[in-house]
Amino acid sequence: MGTKTITMYVSDIDKSEIAEGEAYQLSIRHPDGSTQQLDISAKNYHDLKLEGLGKTLKKRGRKPGSTTRTAAAARRRPNARANSNAEPA
């Protein structure tokens, strides 16, 4: 028997269902150092007048899979060419 997983977003403010791709996620850092993540709908986002508040954090680091074996091999080739100039025995 197979299983099916359904992901559904529900607003943490008014408990209404949020359509896929329409959920806003807010991260709140409390004074004691703990963090809380809230999922809210676009309606709640605009009602709370959060647009333009706070600071937008930039994404950091490399994307997963951005370095491939071919790129790593291309970086190693110059050393291999330097050794290929030697005369064969």
Image (cartoon, rainbow, N blue to C red):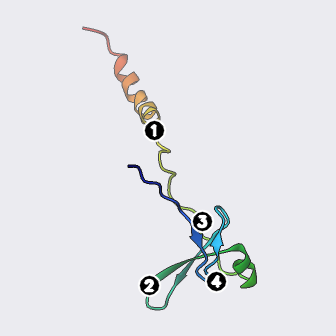
Q: Is residue 71 above or below residue 18?
A: above
Mark 2 residue type = Ser
Secondary structure under the numbered disc 1 in the rendered image: loop
Q: Name the residue under label 1.
A: 68
Q: Residues within 10 Å of mark 3 (few under 14, many from 20)?
A: few
Determine the residue positioned at 61% across, 80% down: 15
Q: Name the residue under label 2.
A: 34
- Given this view, does label 4 or label 1 mark the residue nearer the observer? 4
Q: Which of marks 4 and 1 is nearer the N terminus?
A: 4
- Given this view, does label 3 or label 4 mark the residue nearer the observer? 4
Q: Earlier in the sequence, mark 2 or mark 3?
A: 2
- Given this view, does label 2 or label 3 mark the residue nearer the observer? 2
Determine the residue positioned at 43% across, 28% down: 78
How much space separates mark 3 and mark 4, taking CA atoms? 29 Å
How much space separates mark 2 and mark 3, taking CA atoms? 21 Å
Residues under numbered marks 4 and 1 in contact, where contact means CB atoms less than 8 Å apart: no
Q: Name the residue under label 3.
A: 58
Q: Residue 14 carries which label?
A: 4
